[in-house]
């Protein structure tokens, strides 16, 4: 699996179904190797928050661990469960 986090960019208000303030940003996140349509864009009040939230992949992996098993290259499980 490869995880890519793209640079934040301003949100186009016409491209979303919610109200945005000036400075609102989005980071695209790709999880190559996981076919899940719920992954993708992470929004923040500004570019720093969008990047910070996008880089916090632990909650996403935890949610996906109900369907997938995650391991380190050593074979050890990613989660202690």
Image (cartoon, rainbow, N blue to C red):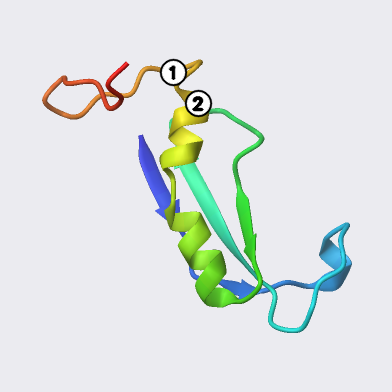
Mark 2 nearby-residue class (10 Å; few <14, some 14–19, many ≥20): some
Q: Which residue is mark 2?
A: 64
Image: 31 above or below 81: below
Asked if one can make out residue 69 in the rendered structure from this viewpoint, the answer is: yes
Q: Quadrant of residue 57?
A: top left
User: At 50% across and 37% down in the image, what residue appears?
Assistant: 60
Give the label on residue 44, or none.
none
Image: 47 above or below 19: below
Among all residues in the image, which is located at the extreme bottom? 22
Give the quadrant of the N terminus: top left
Q: Nearer the viewer, residue 70 or 2?
A: 70
How far across and down, in percent of the image, does residue 2 sit?
36, 41
Q: Quadrant of residue 78?
A: top left
Q: Nearer the viewer, residue 2 or 19?
A: 19
Q: Quadrant of residue 26?
A: bottom right
How far across and down, in percent of the image, does residue 59 sit?
48, 39
Helix, strand or loop for disc 1: loop
Give the label on residue 68, or none.
1
2 relative position to 60: left or right: left
Among all residues in the image, which is located at the extreme left? 74
User: At 56% across and 75% down in the image, what residue appears?
Assistant: 47
Q: Nearer the viewer, residue 20 or 37?
A: 20
Verify CB contact (< 8 Å) between mark 1 and mark 2: yes
């Amino acid at each position: 699996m490869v995880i890519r986090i793209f640079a934040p960019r301003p949100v186009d208000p016409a491209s979303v179904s919610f109200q945005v303030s000036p400075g609102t940003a989005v980071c695209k996140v790709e999880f190559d190797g996981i076919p899940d349509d719920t992954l993708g864009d992470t929004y923040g009040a500004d570019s720093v928050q969008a990047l910070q939230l996008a880089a916090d992949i632990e909650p996403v992996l935890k949610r996906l661990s109900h369907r997938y098993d995650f391991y380190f290259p050593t074979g050890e499980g990613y989660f202690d469960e």
